[in-house]
């Protein structure tokens, strides 16, 4: 009996103390295990898989703080300290020795009718740096993946892998009313993820390249995602 009374006193006293100091008990959900895809291709023979090389190539521009400048260059490539959003893609691929300019120019030469932005007048100095042409090329030559983003959904987020390329497009009906102009845009999917396991993107939206948690933000507030692609190796 005495033991029971002592137990009740301790229980009541403990409850009183607990309520006074306002302890918070947090129950953590089990960590999501998003499988990572690592390719076997290593075009530049540096012992780093090409998909990881692509991400690091894009991330290098963030580190360099390359300046945003949209300009036409008669020799094709912009100076090393300048770029627009599409330049992140070919520069990232160049880190693995893939020549995106050559790849797009060749596809345009063989399938010019598919490239509406070219308008039957190909210009190798600029065609590879235009989002509509990049979109057409990827649609024809890469693996198309989901454009939906479902936070905390393993099956959905497994499709969003580092090195994927995403295309944002200005021709959509659900544009936010306060947004004066939606933008054609492209980005590389990062290997970093937020707390809901949605990946970051590496892109240049001015004034300098960024690696940030803007995949959903850009889709919902600036330009809709119309393409999500993975190059074939």
Image (cartoon, grey):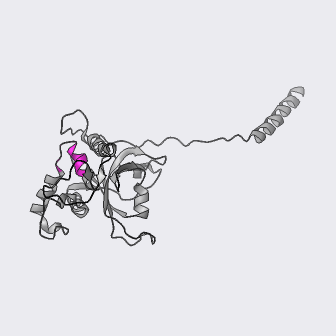
Residue 178, compared with residue 4, is above or below; it is: below
**x and y percentages locating residue 18 in the rendered image:** 76, 38
**x and y percentages locating residue 79 in the rendered image:** 21, 50
Work out whether residue 221 or residue 84 is closer to the camera in this orientation and state it: 84
Residue shown at the point (40%, 71%) measured from the top left: 180
Which of the 4 quarters of the picture holds residue 149? bottom left
Looking at the image, can residue 216 be seen? yes
Left or right placement of residue 8 versus residue 204 in this view = right
Which residues, given as a range, are shown in magenta?
Answer: 89-99
Left or right placement of residue 157 versus residue 92 in this view = right
**x and y percentages locating residue 155 in the rendered image:** 41, 50
Residue at far left of view: 110
Which of the 4 quarters of the picture holds residue 223? bottom left
Magenta stretch: residue 97 in it?
yes
**Number of marks drawn:** 0
Left or right placement of residue 120 versus residue 30 in this view = left
Residue 24, compared with residue 207, is above or below; it is: above
Magenta stretch: residue 147 in it?
no
Residue shown at the point (25%, 61%) measured from the top left: 131
Residue 85, compared with residue 37, is above or below; it is: below
Residue shown at the point (44%, 41%) measured from the top left: 33
Looking at the image, can residue 227 be seen? no
């Amino acid at each position: 009996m005495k033991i029971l009374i002592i137990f009740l006193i301790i229980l009541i006293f403990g409850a009183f103390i607990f309520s006074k100091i306002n302890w918070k008990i947090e129950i953590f959900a089990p960590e999501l295990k998003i499988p990572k895809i690592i390719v076997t291709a290593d075009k530049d023979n540096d012992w780093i898989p090409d998909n990881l090389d692509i991400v690091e190539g894009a991330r290098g521009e963030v580190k360099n703080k390359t300046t945003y400048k949209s300009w036409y260059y008669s020799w094709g490539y912009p100076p090393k300290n300048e770029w627009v959003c599409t330049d992140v893609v070919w520069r990232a691929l160049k880190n693995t020795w893939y020549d995106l300019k050559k790849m797009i120019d060749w596809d345009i030469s063989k399938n010019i009718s598919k490239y509406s932005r070219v308008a039957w007048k190909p210009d190798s100095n600029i065609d590879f740096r235009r989002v509509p042409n990049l979109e057409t090329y990827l649609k024809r030559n890469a693996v198309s993946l989901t454009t939906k983003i479902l936070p905390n959904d393993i099956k959905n987020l497994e499709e969003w892998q580092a090195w994927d390329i995403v295309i944002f497009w200005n021709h959509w009906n659900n544009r936010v009313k306060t947004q004066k102009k939606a933008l054609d845009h492209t980005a590389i999917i990062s290997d970093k993820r937020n707390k809901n396991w949605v990946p970051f993107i590496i892109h240049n939206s001015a004034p300098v390249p960024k690696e940030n948690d803007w995949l959903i933000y850009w889709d919902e507030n600036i330009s809709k995602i119309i393409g999500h692609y993975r190059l074939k190796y």
